[in-house]
Image (cartoon, coloured by chain):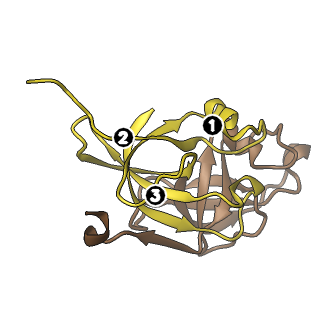
Amino acid sequence: MILGRITGNVVSTIHHPIVTGRKLLLAERLDERCKPTGGYLIALDGIGAGRGETVLILDEGSGARQILDDTGAPVRSIVVAIVDAVDLGSD
Amino acid sequence: MLLGRVIGTVVPAILVDELSATPLLWVQPLDKQGEPDGEPLVCADGTRMAGPGQVIYWVASREAALALDPWFVPVDDAIVGLVDDVHHYTKKELD
């Protein structure tokens, strides 16, 4: 799983049926100090995450299909947790 | 899944049977601001509705095959949906 922050959303009307009724979130990737790495992902929302939230994104297909309960879902990235804090311990 | 823009079509002369009805499109991957990022690639179009100029989102590897019908096909990358709009929250909205 990777750390991300929801910085936008994607509007799509023509898509695979698995996306129907689900939010497509634009998430920037974060490093362990919650700083943007420059990368991003478009992830399906699995838990009701929204604007500005730091989240955990599962970026692996079979796990995503398990969450969606659909063995034919062409989805790899799905938001699976909202992060309250990341504690690196003392330096 | 990542953003991309369709920049052209690919017309194969000979193709495996399972892909014969699937459009193949040149796609330029985009960064989150919509700027080109990386090398163009060929995507199978799972929506069958994308065309040059269209912004799309695409998926790679095994998930690419699952976007297609039939799904047990030899593809690397496939278009999952067409993008109408990408909304970026403003700094004020994010804080």
| Direction from residue B39 to residue B62 in the image, left or right | right
Residue B89, image x and y in percent?
36, 69
Q: Residue at x 68, y 32 (%)?
A: A66
Q: Which chain is brown?
A: B
Circle 2 Cα neighbour tier, 10 Å, few/some/many (<14 / 14–19 / ≥20): few
| Direction from residue A59 to residue A66 in the image, left or right | right
**Tag 1's secondary structure?**
helix
Residue indicated by mark 1: A64
Quarter residue B52 falls in? bottom right
Residue A60, image x and y in percent?
57, 33
Question: Which residue occupies the foreground of this view, B52 or A84?
Answer: A84
Q: Which mark is residue A44?
A: none
Of badges 1 and 2, nearer the viewer stands 2
Circle 3 Cα neighbour tier, 10 Å, few/some/many (<14 / 14–19 / ≥20): many
Discs 3, 1 touching: Cβ within 8 Å:
no
Circle 1 Cα neighbour tier, 10 Å, few/some/many (<14 / 14–19 / ≥20): many
Q: Quadrant of the C terminus of chain B?
A: bottom left
Which of the two labelled residues, at mark 2 and mark 3, occupies the earlier sequence position?
Answer: 3
Quarter residue A50 falls in? bottom left
Amino acid bearing label 1: Ala
Residue indicated by mark 3: A26
Q: Which mark is residue A83?
A: 2
Q: Colour of chain A?
A: yellow
